[in-house]
Amino acid sequence: MAKARPLSGLGPQAPTAHNARAIVHARLEEMYAYAPYVESPEHCQELHDLRIAAKRVRYTLEIFAEFLPASSQDFAEELAVLQDELGALHDSEVMLTLLRSLLPDGQSTATTNVEQEGRVQRQKTLLSPGLLHTLLNVERTDALTNRERHGLASFLRRQEQRRIQAYAAFRQHWDQLEQRNFRAEIEQMLAGGIVSKEEEIHTTSSSEHMGS
Amino acid sequence: MEKQLAPVCAAIDVGSNTIHIVVARCFPADLEILADELELVRIGESVTANGMISPEKMQAALQTLKTYQTLAEQYGARKILVVATEAIRQASNSAEFIARVHQETGLEMLVISGEAEAALTFLGATYEAGKHAQVGVMDLGGGSLELVFAQHGQIAWRTSVPIGSGWLHDQYLSANPPASGEIEAAETFLATYFHGMHLPHAAPVLIVTGGSANSLLYLAREAFHRPGEQTRLSREDLLRCQALLSALSAEDIARIYGQPLARARILLAGTLIIKHVLNQLVVQEITVSPHGIREGVLLAYARSGENWLSAVSQEEQTEESFAESARKTLVERLQTMLAWSDEVLKHEDIEAVHKMRVASRRLRAAMDAYQPCCEPKQFARVYREIKRTANLLGEARDTDVMLHYLCEQLEGLSEEEREGVRWLMTGLRGYRQQTQQELDSFLRNLDGKKLEHRLKTSVREGELA
């Protein structure tokens, strides 16, 4: 999972309203660093990171709600919807990866080496080793009947459809946000109502020498 | 003539260790103190142990308040003001206590905020000291210390630090007398901690209030024959007190120098804290004040009448600093997360795992947001622990979500698919039990109080604006 980038240069004694804006701005930049992957549904890890980054923007807006314009919470709500959509996409990806791990012998639909490598990588990043260890226990998998195996393979195909639908729902929402220039809207919100605060900061000159 | 007209009032402070009364003839800028008494009720002891005021402590506190009410009336007090601080703020049954105080004495006990407490303590501790362009006030208690710096009578910077004499003693100085290695470890901790705080170098006069400072002054008078009217302690005095307190047992200190034993035990810790704050501020001496919050309450009442508390709070309303909002938000979110722990351990409702996980995510988000004002090493340590909590909760919750989803799907599947999915669900349930065991064991060993303290102390301070 992508870590939040440590921020520097924010003074502990600077007004929270000032620092809050700088942090939202930085988290927004982190989120949009994943925007190029939106068009590639196969980049599931990056889309998952986009979800985490969107969540960080949302939580930051919520944490500093009292120091930001009221409209900041409308953006937080919009991000919550986006986060849910990416969450559904991620859940379907996890289920697919799990099923593919259980059905390694041709019942999954991987055709090329590259695809297979990608699946091994996903298995590592999306599933916990403890879960795999329990489910792939030899005694258990040996006991899996052909009928159960076929049933899981058929269920896997349903999950592939589910993933396509989840991606389509997310993508439609993302494109709408791009059309209305969602990022610029947030940045405008951050810029609004800050003038007097900046003036205060200059008069107290606290932020210049408190960054250590 | 003016003296005769000034009203007599009483202020009672219900604190963690003591209940303390001051009765005085009150002027807006001065007090003529008529009575000053304290009783060691130690309400905080039961609040620390159980989160609430025990029936015994409540009874003892009520008895003391009744005695003080009688005392105040004997002096003809026109008004008795009662304020309660940290222990009552923390106690889960504070509403019951307030109601009983009112029923049995008719007194209205006000639970004041930490900000109002700092402002009132500052007012009380400085009114006798005259006007200083710049002055600092340190109120050193058992569990925390409050530092306030003022310029021309206006509070310019303040902070509350969760390090007190009792706390330092319990953490580092348990031997009696403390071992040299223990003292060294305590000193290293204090030097590192205060260095990281970036205290303002702007207060040539430092007034110190609280039990430790007043006991040290008394010790210096007794042991080094300092004159009775002296209220200052130099750095050299502190070093001599430290040497004495390091060499003798608490029992010897209590017997030879007339200190209460409970105070004698923690006095070295108090000395070390004061010394390190002096080092950091580059100040050569402290002025010990016997006054504090009670005198502040009386002066505020003399100035503003019935609106005294809101007047003090309004004076205090400055823009919240980043460090202040960090400490407040982080602690609130940690407490919210920890509050779910018991429910998770009951295994009655899988939603408890979900709620605790959401709370852990919200805490981590707040930590990401406030990381810029935290001390990196200490912060990383707490962050790792929260992340471990979140990961364990996450593994359990993700499995619950998968099981829930699969269960929902069963109805719409073919018989063959259903059989496969049921096989998968059996495996997931087995894994879910394993995650719960791991989670249970982790949560049972999680020391919430220690974590909260580490989190609070990871927030750095800044310099005086």
Image: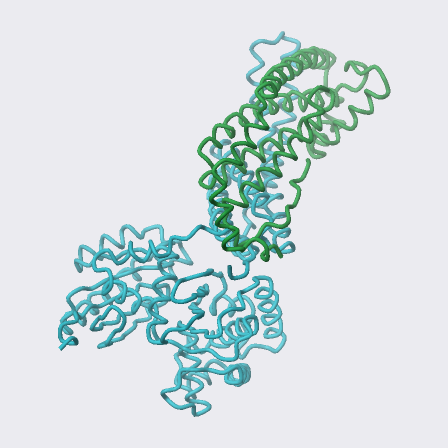
Residue lying at the far top of the rendered structure: B414
Residue B8 lies left or right of residue A107; in this view the side is left
Q: Residue at x 27, y 67 (%)?
A: B299
Report x, y in % for residue B2. 15, 75
Residue B185 lies left or right of residue B13; in this view the side is right
Residue A138 in the image: above or below residue B127: above
Residue lying at the far right of the rendered structure: A113
Q: Residue at x 81, y 14 (%)?
A: A106
Report x, y in % for residue A180. 57, 20
The chain that appears green in the image is A
The N terminus of chain B: image quadrant: bottom left
* Residue B434 in which image quadrant: top right
Give B244 or B159, whichever is nearer the viewer.
Answer: B159
Picture mark count: 0
Give B162 or A92, whichever is nearer the viewer.
Answer: B162
Q: Residue at x 47, y 74 (%)?
A: B266
Residue B130 in the image: above or below residue A173: below
Report x, y in % for residue A140. 72, 25
Q: Residue at x 30, y 71 (%)?
A: B39
Residue A137 in the image: above or below residue B194: above
The chain that appears cyan in the image is B
Report x, y in % for residue B153. 38, 66
Residue lying at the far bottom of the rendered structure: B225
Colour mapping: by chain
